[in-house]
Image: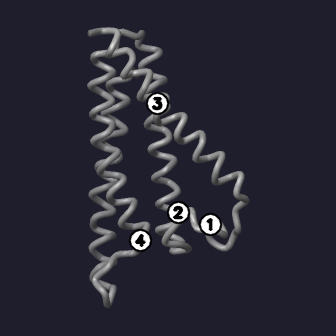
């Protein structure tokens, strides 16, 4: 598979998740006396839509990059894999309804208190993967122009 197709596959999956979670969000609004969906259902809905369009933006940088297909593939994969990782944490919190802020101490996932190093190291790698992958593609574009 090439990097461009990978971007469109991730983008399509994220967009579908965004649309489906929009239904979940609407159902939550209808059930709520305050007409408010659960926090992480809303976060997942918005993030899925945002990440779907981010994948399309990445696809354009893949097209315009002067780097090899292999470099572009892994750079795009790094960013989009961490997009998916972030969404999976939002999904877990939405299903478990265990928090309205995953960064509030104590860090919880269901009934489990998570150690701080897990939260902070996962955020470090998320930043490195998302930003690093994008910067490689962006640099490939800059080299082209």
Location of residue 33 in the rendering, given as x and y in whole percent from the top left corner:
32, 90
Secondary structure of the residue carrying numbered label 2: helix
17 or 34: nearer the viewer: 34
In primary-sequence order, the first of circles 2 and 3 is 3
Give me the disc on residue 77: 3
Asked if the residue at tag 1 contacts the one at tag 2, i.e. Cβ–Cβ closer than 8 Å, the answer is: yes
Q: How far apart in space, not on screen, are marks 3 and 4 (Cα)?
A: 28 Å
In primary-sequence order, the first of circles 1 and 3 is 3
Secondary structure of the residue carrying numbered label 3: helix
Residue tagged by mark 2? 92
Mark 4 vs mark 2: give the one in front. Answer: 4
Location of residue 57 in the rendering, given as x and y in whole percent from the top left corner:
28, 32
8 or 134: nearer the viewer: 134
Compared to 74, does 20 lie above or below?
below
Residue tagged by mark 1? 109
> Residue sitting at 33 percent across and 30 percent down?
58
> Residue sitting at 30 percent across and 60 percent down?
20
Q: How far apart in space, not on screen, are marks 4 and 1 (Cα)?
A: 15 Å
Q: How far apart in space, not on screen, are marks 2 and 1 (Cα)?
A: 8 Å
Location of residue 81 in the rendering, given as x and y in whole percent from the top left corner:
49, 38
In primary-sequence order, the first of circles 4 and 1 is 4
Asked if the residue at tag 2 contacts the one at tag 4, i.e. Cβ–Cβ closer than 8 Å, the answer is: no
Give me the disc on residue 39: 4
Q: How far apart in space, not on screen, are marks 1 and 3 (Cα)?
A: 26 Å
Q: How far apart in space, not on screen, are marks 2 and 3 (Cα)?
A: 22 Å
Report which quarter residue 35 is drawn in: bottom left
Give me the disc on residue 29: none
């Amino acid at each position: 598979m090439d990097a461009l197709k990978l971007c469109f596959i991730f983008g399509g999956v994220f967009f579908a998740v965004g649309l489906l979670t929009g239904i979940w969000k609407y159902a939550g609004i209808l059930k709520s006396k305050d007409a408010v969906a659960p926090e992480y259902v809303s976060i997942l809905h918005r993030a899925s839509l945002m990440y779907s369009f981010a994948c399309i933006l990445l696809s354009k940088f893949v097209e315009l990059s002067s780097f090899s297909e292999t470099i572009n593939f892994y750079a795009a994969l790094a960013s989009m894999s961490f997009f998916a990782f972030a969404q999976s944490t939002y999904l877990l919190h939405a299903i478990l309804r265990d928090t309205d802020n995953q960064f509030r101490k104590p860090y919880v996932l269901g009934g489990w208190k998570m150690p701080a190093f897990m939260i902070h190291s996962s955020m470090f790698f998320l930043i490195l993967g998302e930003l690093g992958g994008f910067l490689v593609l962006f640099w490939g574009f800059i080299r082209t122009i």
